[in-house]
Image (cartoon, coloured by chain):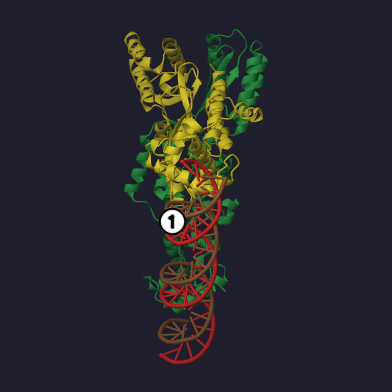
Chain colours: A yellow, B green, C brown, D red
Amino acid sequence: MQLDERKYLILQAIIDDYILTAMPVGSRTISRKSGVGYSPATIRNEMSDLEELGYLDQPHTSAGRVPSNKAYRLYVDHLIKTSKLTSDERERMHDHLVSRSKQVESVIRSAAGVLSDATKYTSVIVAPKLGSLRIKHIQLVPVAERTALMIIVTNAGIVKDAVIRVPEGMDADDLYSISRVLTQKLADKPLEAVRQAFSELLRTAEQNRKLLGETLQVIEKRLEEGGDASDVIVGGSTNLLEYPEYSDVNKARSFLSVLESKDTLRKLLSRDGGMEVSIRIGPENQLPALSDCSIVTASYRLGDQSTGTLGIIGPTRMNYNRVISVLDFMSRALSDVLSEYQ
Amino acid sequence: MQLDERKYLILQAIIDDYILTAMPVGSRTISRKSGVGYSPATIRNEMSDLEELGYLDQPHTSAGRVPSNKAYRLYVDHLIKTSKLTSDERERMHDHLVSRSKQVESVIRSAAGVLSDATKYTSVIVAPKLGSLRIKHIQLVPVAERTALMIIVTNAGIVKDAVIRVPEGMDADDLYSISRVLTQKLADKPLEAVRQAFSELLRTAEQNRKLLGETLQVIEKRLEEGGDASDVIVGGSTNLLEYPEYSDVNKARSFLSVLESKDTLRKLLSRDGGMEVSIRIGPENQLPALSDCSIVTASYRLGDQSTGTLGIIGPTRMNYNRVISVLDFMSRALSDVLSEYQ
DNA sequence: GTTAGCACTCATACACATCGAGTGCTAACG
DNA sequence: CGTTAGCACTCGATGTGTATGAGTGCTAAC
C-alpha cells in the first residue's frame, strides 16, 4: 500500500494536532478541521490504513491515534513546511546575544538562554572543540614559591589555565622570558601540532628542560581532556517539566539526570555532516532515558577551523517547524557574533 | 507551660522518626521505641501538649503528628547530637577533592559533587568574592587587529578575561611592555584599590591614555558584576526529586527553577558571621519557593582575605546531624586544598 | 501520674456503576 | 466504487458507596 495525497494530508493533520495537544487524536477532530472535507468515517478508514503502515499507534481501542516515530520521521523529511521567523523576533534574539559581556563563554551562555526561551524546550550548546583551536599566547604567572599558573590563550579567545610547578629560584622575570619564547615557538600552531614543536624546543633549550617538560605534560593533558564540564552549557532545563509528558516525577528525574552528565550530552550532540540542521527522533538517539525525546542539532563556527554544536532537546511531539527555524537562525547568529574575535 | 525532660525526649523521637520516614508519626510508633518507656496514651497526652505549644502539627484529626518549623529550630539549637564522620569517609571525600585537576574552578566543582553525593541533597557553592582578591598579573594578548584579550590573574589563581579594543598600530611587543607596566603597578593591590592606582598611572603614561582608560573600565565592570554565572556551582540538583516531598511535579519545578537562577542562589547563600555552620529553616529563608526547604551553610577560605560559601539545600526534615558534620568537614577540607595555591 | 478501653475521625483502597469519546463494521447512498 | 450514516462495542475516566485501619481524644480505673 502506498501513501496517496489524502493519507499525507490526514497524517499531517494528526501530527499537527498532536503536537499542540499531546492527546490522542480522534477522527471527528480531524474531520472538523478546515482543509479536510471528509466525514469521520472516511478518516477512520484512512487512519486504520495508516496504523497498519506503522505511522500511527493506538494507546487502546477506544482512544484516538497517536503519531509513531516513523510518522515524525516522515514529517520532518517531507511534510514539514518551514516558516521564517519574524524579523522582529530575529532582531530580539540577536540583541540578546550581543548585549552581554564579550567573553566567549558568556556569549554561549546567553545563546543557550535565548534558545530555550524561544523554543520553550531545553537547549544544549557544546563549546568549540579545543583540538581545532590554535594557540595564540602562553603565559606563565608566578603565584607562589615554586608554583606558577600557566595560561593558554587560543585564537578563539578561550582561556585555559593550570597550576604547574616550576624549578626552585625562578623569579617573575625568568617566567616572563620563558613565556615569550614559548609563545614565539608555539603561536599559530594547532594544539595537535604542539607536541612536535615542543620536543624540538626541548632539545634546544637545555637550561629549562624540567619546566618545559612539565608544561608540555599539562598542555597534553588539556588536549586529552577534550574539554571540561564548563564546555557544555544547558539552558532551560526545567522547561520540559511544563509538558504533560513529564508529569511523572520519575520520567522528569531520569531526564534531568541526563542533563547533569556533561559527558553524555557532549556525545549526544556529536554529529556528522555540515552546517545544516539534523534531527534525531526518539530511539534514534541511543539513550534509553531519552527514548521519547527528539534532539535537533545545528553547528556554529568559531573562526575557520573550529565548530561547536547547538541543539534543542524536546518531546518527540515537539514543534519541529519552530525549532528548526530557531536553530537555523541561531547557528548563523552565533557564528557571526563569535567571528568578531577572529 | 514549660518543656520538661520527657517532652524533649518525645519531641526528639518524633523528629528522628519523621526525618527517616516523612510520614506523620503516631503515638504507638514512639511508644515502641527503645528508650521511651511510656504507653501510647501517655505519649498522646504529651503530644497534645506539644501541639498546643506549637512544636507539632497535625495534618488531620486521625493522622499522626508532624514536627513544625519551630520544632526543627529547637532541634538544631538544643537537641541535636553531632556525630563525627568516620575517618574512612573523611578520607574518601578528601581524596575526591584533590584527585581532580588543579584549576580552582575544578576543585570547587568536584567539591559540589562530593557534597551532594555525601548528603543526598542538593549542594551549592559560591566562589570567593572577587572584591577580596588581589591582582597578581595582568596580561594583554593580541587576538586580532586592534583587538586584545585582557587576562587578569588573581592571587587565588582565578582567571578573568575580557576582550578590549586597542589603538591602531599596536603590536605584540607594545602590548607586552604595557602588560609589564600594568602588572608592576597593580600587583598585590586588592581590586578595590585598583581604581586609584590606575588614575595615577593614567597621569604618568600619556601615550597610552586611551588604552589604559578602556582597560580600567573593563576592570571596574568586572568588579561591579561581582561575579558571573559560573561563580555559583550546583551539585546534585536532581537529588531532591528522590524524596516524597517532591513527588508533585509542580513543587519539583519551582524548586529546580530556583537552582537555575544563579543570582538568587548567591543571595540565598549570603551569610553573616564567621566560619561556623549556620542553618535557616523553612520560611527563615525569605524565598516562598523554598518555604519547606532548609538551607545549611558554612564558609571556606581562600587565602587570608577572601571567603566563599558552601551550602546544602534539602527538605526541612533533612538529616541535620549528617549535613552539619559533612559541611563542617568540607569547609575545612576545601580551605586546605585551596590554600595550596597561596 | 499512668494506662486501658472505647467511641470517633478521616485518608485510603476497593468494588461497582456510569459516562462518553472513539472505534470498527455494515449497509445504504450518490 | 468511493463515501457516509448508523450502530454496537470497547475501555479509560469519573463518581459513589463501603470497608479498613491507623490514629486520636476522652474517661475511668489502676
The image position of residue A7, as x and y in percent, is 48, 38
The 10 Å Cα crowd at callout 1, few under 14, some 14 to 19, many 20 or more, is some
Residue located at (48% from left, 33% from top)? A76
* Between B207 and A323, the one nearer to me in the picture: A323
Reply above or below: A146 against A42. Answer: above
* Between B191 and B57, the one nearer to me in the picture: B57
* Between A104 and C11, the one nearer to me in the picture: C11
The image position of residue A22, as x and y in percent, is 52, 46
Does residue B127 appear anywhere in the picture?
A: no
* Between A299 and B300, the one nearer to me in the picture: A299
Residue located at (39% from left, 48% from top)? B118
The image position of residue A102, as x and y in percent, is 58, 24
Reply above or below: D12 against B224. Answer: below
**Quarter occupied by the N terminus of chain A:** top left
Residue located at (48% from left, 22% from top)? A275
Describe residue B23's horizontal placement relative to residue A28 as left or right: left
Q: Tell how many labels.
A: 1
Label 1 is found on which chain of the structure?
Answer: B
Instruction: State the image quarter where residue B97 is shown.
Output: top left
Does residue A229 appear anywhere in the picture?
A: yes
The image position of residue B279, as x and y in percent, is 52, 53
Q: Amino acid at mark 1?
A: Asn
Residue with the mark numbered 1: B321
Instruction: State the image quarter where residue B69 is shown.
Output: bottom right
Instruction: State the image quarter where residue A200 is shown.
Output: top left
Q: Tag 1, which secondary structure?
A: helix
